[in-house]
Amino acid sequence: MLRVFQTDILNPEQFVVTLELVPGRESTGRSVDTVMGIAKDAFADGRVSAVSITDNPGGNPSLSPDAIGYRIFSIGMDVIVHFTCRDMNRVGMESRTLQLAMMGMKNILALTGDYSGMGFGGQGAPVFDLDSVNLQIMIMLISKRINAAGDPDGFFTGCAVSPFKQTEGECVAQYAKMSRKAAAGAQFAITQLGYDARKFHELIGIQSYMDLTIPTLGSVYLLTPKTARIMNRGRVPGAVVTDQLLETVEGEWQDQQQGKAAAIERAARLGAVLQGLGYRGIHIGGIHRDFSTVGMILDRMARIKDQWRDFIPQFDYPQPGGFYAFREAPPAPATTPVFGLHPQPVPVVDRVLHPLMKAAHSLFFTFESPLAPLYRTICQTLDTGISGRLFLHLIEHPIKRMLLGCLQCGDCAIQHVGFLCPESGCPKHTRNGACGGSRHGMCEVNADRRCVWFHAHNRLDAQGKIKELCDGCVPPRMWELNHTSSWINFHLRRDHQSSGSEIADFCRQATCRLLADDG
């Protein structure tokens, strides 16, 4: 089995280069030939540890990364397979994991995934049965299983993280989820795309503060005007190109040759800055025609890497009113983060409803309550015959529908999300933290609604309780409880909080790093 990427990134003396390739919507022809050609040239060049293959980027159909990845893997080039949660339920995802194990491709970038785009006959149905934290755990547990069956090489899984968020709530949500991903078994990380050196510096500082020793690759991109405009409009979830940077790029490309030269120089200088800041390597994107541009970027990087401090001011593209977790700017070492110094105004309804729901939860939904045996007896009675259904439809559901927009999943998780519903509040149903797609605190999918995790942060921050955003890992929803009473399921120990499944046991034992002290 090839283990080039794993060996390289775990070697602290090695600066790793990976290259992202994007398959097209065909199984043969020019797009396949182009991807294969770039991969073959990358292998021949010898400086690229692995190519990563995207999984239906933007939620739109393309050739499977497993199929073309295996062809690339067969020529000797190591491969990182992108694995998203959007298109398969947990049964299909487990099957795919076993398939990848049999194929020998065990470098996995586990992602929640962009929301569903347009496919055959219209928009695809979004699945999101697991989130990226649950996916990490599933792959890790399967890896142990195949090790026990005699395969010595387990999976090597990574995660994505985006430090390029405008608001404090979004930043905290990203770093809290990164902590959960590390606890779930992530062994490397790749950043989203941005051009703010202070934000890149922030991520390294946060990892140090949280005592996370996860090797991280910073994203570098060959930025053209077309791509810059798309990213500037927010059409690539998580990527940030500010108005100022867009204007600069459009000016550079008034002349094609000068524009390309400027794009190569920007990529090389950002790579040098990332190496200087302590990143373990770079992840190069935006290469769609041939490998020669990658060679130019790496050649230029090698010549200028010692000048990285001089290039830091050239990556000063902050978002208007953007939050920074540290007062220090690079290259000064980061010290203590400044979370919670300026809490966002919390609406009156949140100031009243959140403490009320938390108090009710402590009274009625903890097994340590002195009344817990009585509640269990009541629920056992309600669980038989028509009484339980009447209770659900006449009492429980109307209350939860009014307060939470409840969808009757039967496996309530509001206590993990600041007493907000992750099923009705998040189109991706994430129970372990925000995806990377929010923009200015608003949802990637429903741009007129706040991200539920941004909302949860603001609630918790007002009470000095943001640590709750990374309080262990949360098991996936139990679909067998759909449209049943979550209150009865809790007290009869049927829901995820009492589940005896392998993933639930792991989640209960997971230890996540803390972001800040309460108060």
Image: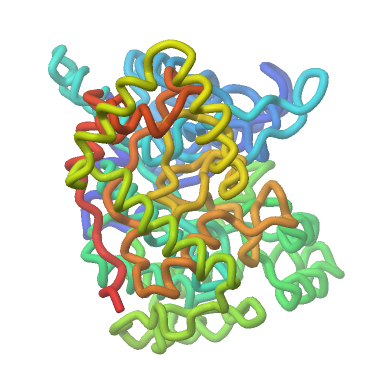
> Which residue shows up at 50% across the image and 45% down it?
19
> Which residue shows up at 36% across the image and 58% down it?
359
Residue 364 location, quadrant: top left
Residue 106 pos. (x, y %): 33, 28
Give the number of marks.
Answer: 0
Residue 265 pos. (x, y %): 60, 69
Residue 196 pos. (x, y %): 55, 74
Residue 59 location, quadrant: top right
Of 416 and 363, which appears nearest the observer?
363
Of 44 and 305, which appears nearest the observer?
305
Residue at the farthest right position:
254
For this view, does 46 lie left or right of residue 494? right
Residue 351 visible in the shown view: yes
Residue 78 visible in the shown view: no
For this view, does 224 lie left or right of residue 76? right
> Which residue shows up at 54% across the image and 53% down it?
436
> Which residue shows up at 45% across the image and 28% down it?
410
Residue 174, above or below 472: below
- Which part of the image, by quadrant, shows the N terminus? top left
Of 503 and 289, which appears nearest the observer?
503
Residue 62 pos. (x, y %): 66, 26
